[in-house]
Structures are given as structure tokens and as C-alpha cells.
Image: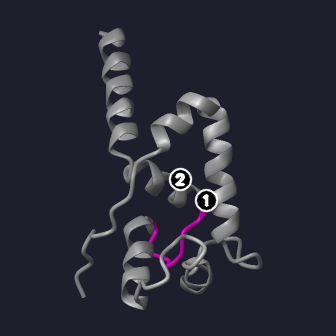
Amino acid sequence: MACQNEVMFEDFFPAMVERLGAEGFMKELCNGFQLLMDAEKRVITFESLKRSSGFLGLQGISDEELRCMLKEGDLDGDGTLNEMEFCTLMFRLSPALMQSSNELLEEALIGEI
């Protein structure tokens, strides 16, 4: 059961960060998490993601693809995404944000030398 990263999307995150600022962008990521999470369990579950797949524009996505999406971000192996795992996954899916993060890290490391 190998997961394939075939979902393509246009990366609007850099524009959102520029427009909203870092704090505003993080608030929007948290709002996205709230929309997708199971209200009782306070995490994104397979079931809550499946319920939201139409809202996300993923009407034809299979159960296996949804499980792979969860697995991609599930850092602690519990089969769900907590808010930190969700936000981390969103950053990892944005090549431009990852590049910016790498540049900031490099600058910080150079400044310490």
C-alpha cells in the first residue's frame, strides 16, 4: 500500500503570508484545521477528512488516497492529525514556504558564527 503524491495544487501560501503576515497566516491555517477536525476528538480523522473532501474540491478521491493524505502528516503514528501535524504538513506541501524557511535558517546559523 504505497502512497503516491499525485495531488497537484497551486501554492497560494506565499501570497497569503505576504498579505496576512506570519501571524495572520498561522491563524488561517488554524482555521483550516478547525474546519477539517472531528469536533469531539479535536483531531483530523479519516472520517472527518472524508466528510470534508467535497468541501476541499476532492469529490472523486478514494478512501486509500485519503488514508495516504493522513499518513503523510501523521508524525506520531496515531492515525490522526493534531493541529501541529496539520500545520507542519501544510508547510511541507508549500515549496516556496519551505525555501523561505531554509533561507531564514541559513541566515540565523550564519549570524551565530
Spot occupied by residue 95 in the image (x, y as percentages of width and height) = 32, 44
Q: Are marks 1 and 2 in contact (CB under 8 Å)?
A: yes
Instruction: Provide the residue span drawn in magenta.
Output: 76-82
In the image, what residue occupies the spot 56% across and 55% down?
Answer: 84
Left/right placement of residue 50 relative to residue 71 reads: right
Q: In the image, which disc is placed on residue 83? A: 1
In the image, what residue occupies the spot 55% across and 38% down?
Answer: 16
Amino acid at the residue labelled 1: Glu
Give the class, few, some or many, for how many residues have Cα within 10 Å of label 1's Cα (few <14, many ≥20): some
Give the class, few, some or many, for how many residues have Cα within 10 Å of label 2's Cα (few <14, many ≥20): some
Quarter of the rendering occupied by the N terminus: bottom left
In the image, what residue occupies the spot 35% across and 10% down?
Answer: 111
Amino acid at the residue labelled 2: Cys
Q: In the image, which disc is placed on residue 4? A: none
Is 78 contained in the magenta span? yes
Q: In the image, which disc is placed on residue 87? A: 2
Q: Nearer the viewer, residue 19 or 25?
A: 19
| Secondary structure found at label 1 | helix
Q: Quadrant of residue 17?
A: top right
Q: Nearer the viewer, residue 61 or 69?
A: 61
As drawn, 110 above or below 98: above
Q: Quadrant of residue 96?
A: top left
Q: Nearer the viewer, residue 91 or 82?
A: 91
| Secondary structure found at label 2 | helix
